[in-house]
Amino acid sequence: MVAMRPKVRTRRVGALNDPGAGADEWGMRARTANSHVLSSGLDESRETLAGWRDDRWRVLRGWFALSVAIALTLLAAVWVTSGLLTPDLSPWKLPGYTEPAHFSDMLPILYRNGLVLALHATACVAGFIAGASMPLAAEQRTGVSRWIHLKAGQLAILFVAAVTIFSLSTQALYLGFQGSTLAMQLHISHLELILSVLPHALIELTALFLPLAAWLIASRRGEWNQLLAATAVTVVIAIPMLLVAATIEVFVWPHILHSLSGYHYSLVEWTVR
């Protein structure tokens, strides 16, 4: 009688040592796809910048025209909201008006504006991701991964729209409250206050809305692949504009207020000049 040997299952050595071979293969394909998307985005950005240089940067005119229009619209909204909001009765400290102005007084202004510019630049990059990168990445994927990338693009577009609405509404309310308080405490009209801030506010708001203006124009034309280059260019232009605006706000605007107001504001009391 012959004894039967039990069957022993054998595995390939490679399979034992690498149980996640399938996952590694998928990860390699994903990394290759991401590398392709990044490389394509950088190549398109270089081509876009070269085209703008050859066209003598005519694209800037559209960006600035739309950004100035948005800035004027926001200032009009501030004028309206400043007449509707209840002013703050507590004393305000205004460098250059209630106390001497210093260069350090520019830092809080630059910090706030830097956050807003970063938010708008992020929205512009999100537009590039939504319109250019995500569809390109989806072409390299199948199944659930492809569906996620397609939906992520739609979510990025919604994010840009939400950022635009949030930025406009919050700035209109915040600046309107400031305008209401300053107009009351300086005994000037809301219109006079709006006119007094034009020298710095128009420069500041135009700089802040440049990335969103570039996004709006590119999205209308379907030129999503240009948004990465537009983000870099608008931020580079906006930074010196914000520096100029902050300088005017701290060292020039208080003198304009002095010329408009018949009162000298003190932290202790109001005294008629």
Image (spheres, rainbow, N blue to C red):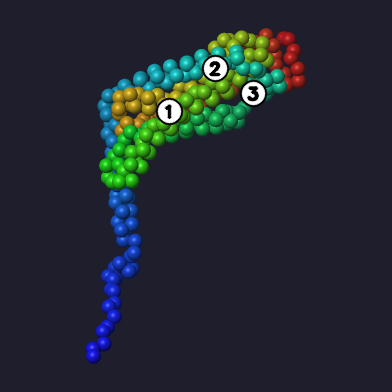
The first of marks 2 and 3 along the sequence is 2
Given the image, on which type of amino acid does mark 1 rest?
Ala
Find residue 272 and name its label.
none
Residue indicated by mark 1:
161
Identify the residue under disc 2.
Answer: 78
Amino acid type, mark 2 = Val
Q: Nearer the viewer, residue 27 or 266?
A: 27
Secondary structure under the numbered disc 1 in the rendered image: helix
Q: Is residue 98 visible?
A: no
x, y percent for residue 177? 61, 20
Q: Residue at x 57, y 16 (%)?
A: 81
Q: Amino acid at mark 3?
A: Pro
Residue drawn at x 69%, y 11% is 263
Q: Secondary structure at mark 2?
A: helix
How far across and down, in percent of the image, does residue 98 sit? 68, 21
For disc 3, the marked residue is 95
